[in-house]
Image: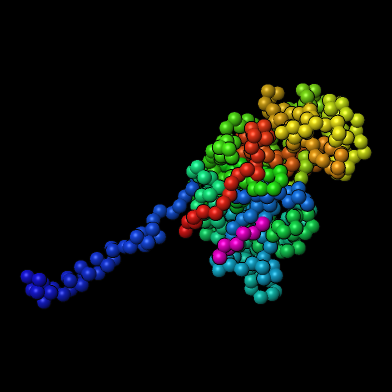
């Protein structure tokens, strides 16, 4: 029977062999064609630059992957990085054209088509999408090239959150910017800025869109050595010794200013439950000011009430601070210097963001402690108060862009942990 089949039906035999080969898949092939890894939360390591007081994230970009240090800009519209001097090498770089969908998404309807006189390279192609890039510290601007490339972020789900597999976005939109924007102002080793702002092409928006989780992210900025984190997606987030820092968050409405900055409404400020008489209605939140800036009248009122409550004589101020004290009269505790708390009364008087000594005082020079608030002159950033990075350190601050709510923990030192405790280590990777 078999010989009859082979002799008379060779074509049928060929088909049987063909289909058996097509549907025989090795375990490695099956793994390669399996479901795409879709985490529900991601974590980006963050360190503090002591020279500037700003915070830097190591972002894995390009092919092959390279860790690129980028300054965190809470209100930045997109990620931009230096591409000049042959420093940007990647086999997966692509520059969308000036009338492309990507250009509309990043810039809007008013497209700017780039021309470039030198040889083609990352950041320099003719007919590509031009984007205005701004150094958030100096305000200096230049034109960069919209680009796409691979970006990788570590998963933060599961019990070992800082050691999860790597998730990859293969066509992440960013801007190639000229090196002249890096200095001065940004940390010395930073190669650009990672924007977390309210925009379609910011890092939180692109990660949420690519992986299908809600637009929610949280910052936990470190005070000293060690990694803090920016989290994307759903919690909980566990810090040693097993503390879920998302528990007991206090929530207040999150608003967006006319300039696209994250802001919260305030009903007043109290120090040791004593009100600061000058009215304040809103506070901008930023990570590119190292300290909180107050308009001049609010600064004078707050420092006077604080000094009266502290009851320690003031000493010669140390720039940029205006209210400084003899450190010998201030005791030290696990939550920082023992000074009167500064309470930001939020959308109602019963909801407050308490700023304790670790976030309100700084040793400006040996033996001198200063209130870590700066006189910003007349309405810095168009608001009477701009909350800076120092006041955000060792606080989990969650930005829920779907519900337009801001959640905050106040100082994690009070819960016997800190942002520097998050454990990032190497682990397996995902394709």
Q: Which residues are magenta?
A: 62-69
Q: Residue at x 75, y 58 (%)?
A: 188
Extreme residue toward the right, this view:
316
- Quadrant containing the N terminus is bottom left
Residue 360, located in which quarter of the rendered image? top right
Tally of marks: 0
Q: Magenta span has 191?
A: no
Residue 297: tell me if it is visible: no
Query: Nearest the camera: 321 or 222?
Result: 222
Query: Nearest the camera: 166 or 150?
Result: 166
Q: Is residue 146 left or right of 308 when viewed as pictured?
A: left
Residue 238, located in which quarter of the rendered image? top right
Q: Residue at x 47, y 58 (%)?
A: 431
Q: Is residue 411 above or below residue 36?
A: above
Q: Is residue 11 left or right of 56 when viewed as pictured?
A: left
Residue 301 in the image, given as x and y percentages of width and height: 85, 30
Residue 250 in the image, given as x and y percentages of width and height: 63, 30
Q: How is the image coloured?
A: rainbow
Residue 285 in the image, given as x and y percentages of width and height: 71, 40
Residue 92 in the image, given as x and y percentages of width and height: 55, 66
Residue 262: tell me if it is visible: yes
Q: Residue at x 86, y 34 (%)?
A: 328
Query: Nearest the camera: 232 or 148?
Result: 232
Query: Nearest the camera: 113 or 333?
Result: 333
């Amino acid at each position: 029977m078999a010989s009859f089949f082979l002799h008379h039906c060779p074509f049928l035999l060929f088909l049987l062999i063909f289909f058996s080969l097509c549907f025989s898949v090795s375990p490695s092939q099956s793994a390669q064609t399996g479901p795409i890894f879709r985490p529900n939360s991601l974590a980006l390591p963050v360190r503090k630059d002591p020279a500037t007081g700003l915070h830097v994230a190591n972002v894995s970009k390009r092919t092959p992957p390279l860790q690129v240090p980028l300054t965190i800009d809470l209100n930045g519209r997109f990620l931009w990085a230096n591409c000049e001097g042959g420093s940007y090498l990647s086999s997966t770089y692509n520059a969308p054209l000036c009338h492309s969908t990507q250009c509309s998404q990043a810039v809007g309807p008013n497209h700017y088509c780039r021309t470039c006189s030198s040889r083609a390279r990352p950041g320099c192609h003719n007919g590509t999408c031009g984007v205005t890039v701004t150094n958030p510290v100096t305000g200096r601007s230049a034109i960069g090239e919209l680009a796409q490339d691979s970006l990788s972020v570590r998963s933060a789900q599961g019990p070992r959150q800082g050691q999860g597999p790597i998730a990859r976005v293969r066509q992440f939109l960013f801007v190639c910017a000229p090196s002249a924007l890096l200095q001065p102002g940004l940390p010395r080793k930073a190669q650009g800025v990672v924007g977390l702002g309210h925009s379609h092409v910011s890092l939180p928006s692109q990660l949420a869109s690519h992986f299908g989780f809600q637009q929610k992210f949280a910052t936990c900025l470190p005070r000293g050595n060690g990694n803090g984190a920016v989290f994307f997606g759903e919690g909980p987030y566990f810090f040693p010794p097993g503390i879920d820092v998302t528990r007991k968050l206090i929530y207040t409405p999150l608003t967006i200013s006319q300039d696209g900055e994250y802001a919260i409404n305030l009903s007043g400020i109290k120090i040791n439950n004593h009100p600061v008489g000058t009215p304040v209605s809103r506070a901008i939140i930023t990570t590119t000011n190292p300290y909180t800036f107050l308009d001049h009248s609010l600064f004078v009122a707050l420092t006077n009430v604080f000094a009266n409550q502290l009851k320690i004589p003031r000493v010669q101020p140390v720039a940029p601070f205006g209210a400084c004290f003899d450190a010998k009269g201030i005791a030290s505790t696990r939550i920082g210097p023992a000074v009167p708390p500064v309470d930001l009364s939020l959308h109602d008087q019963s909801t407050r963001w308490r700023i304790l000594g670790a976030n309100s005082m700084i040793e400006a020079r040996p033996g001198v402690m200063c209130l870590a608030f700066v006189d910003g002159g007349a309405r810095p950033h168009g608001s009477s108060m701009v909350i800076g990075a120092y006041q955000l350190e060792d606080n989990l601050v969650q930005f829920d862009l779907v519900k337009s709510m801001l959640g905050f923990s106040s100082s994690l030192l009070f819960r016997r942990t800190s942002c520097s405790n998050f454990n990032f280590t190497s682990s397996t990777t995902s394709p």
